[in-house]
Image: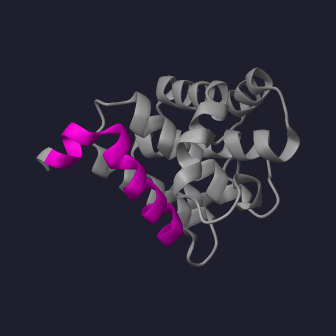
Amino acid sequence: MSNPGMGNLAAGNEARKAPNKSPRHRARELALQGIYQWRVTSGDEAQIEKQIHAEKNLGRYDKELFSTLLRGALKQHAALEAMLAPYLDRPIGELSYVEFAVLLLGAFELSQHLEVPYKVVINEAVELAKTFGGIDGHKYVNGVLDKLAPQVRAAEVNAG
């Protein structure tokens, strides 16, 4: 599946499937792809998930994590967008599709996956933005999630 402006995250893109990527990182990449596709097409989340699972040559990925991230971020997108809004410098509709997808994924993981350290969530989001976003998109993602983290992970941020 190919998405304009994002590169092909799935079949046949060897550069994006470096063998050193963990199955969890690859799951995040695929969840990003699904959120991106949903944003571009306003497609059905179940169909997007099914389509991605059916792709060939995806490499090793944590299928359960992928599904949890994709479903959760899309089901909770309105609440996540509201959570992010105070930290954005422009309306959410003006974000690039990649920035939107990375921030939605990062906000979901920060707020719902407390077992993953907040620094890991932010680092993963920054890496996704570096790989798939614009030149300085990763800096923007880092800044927004760094401001959001104390709001949703106060105890962890203050302890750390």
Q: Position of residue 136 (x, y in %)?
A: 56, 77
33 w.r.t. 53: above or below? below
Q: Nearer the viewer, residue 119 or 8?
A: 119
Work out which residue is located at the far bottom of the displayed protein and give it. Answer: 135
Question: Residue 126: which quarter of the image?
Answer: bottom left
Residue in view at x 80 percent, y 52 percent: 2
Question: Residue 95: which quarter of the image?
Answer: bottom right
Q: Nearer the viewer, residue 131 or 113?
A: 113
Report how many numbered discs are placed on residues in the image.
Answer: 0
Kindly tell me whether residue 23 is visible in this rendering: yes
Residue in view at x 58 percent, y 44 percent: 104
Q: Is residue 96 left or right of residue 138?
A: right
Q: Is residue 40 magenta?
A: no
Q: Position of residue 30 (x, y in %)?
A: 60, 42
Which residues are the magenta region?
Answer: 138-158
Query: Secondary structure of the magenta portion, mostly?
Result: helix
79 w.r.t. 28: above or below? above
Q: Is residue 141 magenta?
A: yes
Q: Nearer the viewer, residue 151 or 135?
A: 151
Residue in view at x 12 percent, y 45 percent: 159
Residue in view at x 71 percent, y 57 percent: 91
